[in-house]
Amino acid sequence: MRVVMLNIWLGPAPLPAWLPQLIANRNAVGAPFEWWILTDVPSPPANTGSVRFVVTSRAEIRMRVRQHLGAELALGASGDHRKITEVRPMMGLLFGDIIGDADFWGYFDLDTVLGRLSAFYPAQVLALYDVLAANVWVTEGPLTIVRNNDLCNNLWRAGHDVLQRLAVPGRIFSHDEIMFGKVVWDAWMRGEIHAHFGHRFTHDSEQAAVELRPGGVLYDRARGDGGKYCREHRGREVIGHHFARTKRWPLSCTENL
């Protein structure tokens, strides 16, 4: 089994300062996951283990959207890099040359640390589902996995005005979460696919106290409180942590090793 996870990072901002920790963390996740970062930042790091870098450009991304989707992407020279997240549900079509014959593809955020992904999504679980989202009701920007076949690669087409919205400059319509989440949920309820919603990330916008324990266990000491009568059960293993607000790697260097 092979799972190709994709992220597009476009300048002018440099790649994040926590990139060394991210590379170490993703390599600790292990097979069958590969982590591909497409970027226009000059001289990205060398490929390391399961983390791969591909040099691209805004012009090439717009060309791929035009060629594979027959649409225009309002991706200007700078200042609108978040617009690129709108094409995430279409990545199965846009980057077939990278995904190849992988069993799954997906998208992820760089401002995340992962725990034991293989414990939450072992091969026998992946085999059961077509879409797996690390949230309880929407597909999640930090981590969403999609089966690589014609049906799943085109699920996004059921979204409302998706292609037209790509051409709207300066507007983010949450295609990767709200739109795609609804499309996946509806297809699941119609019995067309099997979807898995759950294993929600912790976030730095809420109470969270994550630590990395032996064996790659990411543990949140503030999560899973059973109530005022069950405080001894507070804390549990989590699939990942999203530090979207602080933009600082939430673990010490010692914990990360």
Image: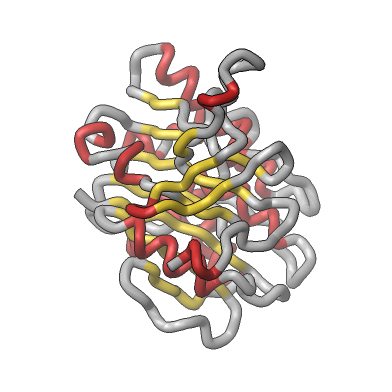
- Residue 15, image x, y percentages: 61, 74
- Front residue of 180/107: it is 107
57 above or below 227?
A: below
Q: Residue at x 74, y 56 (%)?
A: 246
Report how many numbered discs are placed on residues in the image. Answer: 0
**Residue 136 at least partly seen:** yes
Quarter of the image for the C terminus: give it.
Answer: bottom left
Question: Image height check: is 149 above or below 230?
Answer: below
Q: Is residue 114 left or right of residue 138?
A: left
* Furthest-bottom residue in this view: 43
Q: Is residue 182 visible?
A: no
Which residue is found at the position 67% from the left and 62% from the top? 248
In the rendered image, residue 142, in percent from the top left (x then y), is placed at 55, 47
Residue that appears at 74% across and 72% down: 77
Q: Is residue 215 above or below residue 201?
A: below
Scheme of image coloration: secondary structure
Residue 12 horizontal/vertical position (percent): 72, 75
| Foreground pick, 173 / 204 | 204
Taking depth in this image into account, of 162 and 92 the one nearest to the observer is 92
Q: Position of residue 75 (x, y in %)?
A: 69, 61
Residue at screen point 44% across, 74% down: 53
On the picture, is 170 further left or further right than 17? right
User: On the picture, is 144 further left or further right than 3?
Assistant: right
Among the 4 quarters of the image, the one containing residue 192: top left
Along the line of sight, which residue is nearer the eye, 185 or 34?
Answer: 34
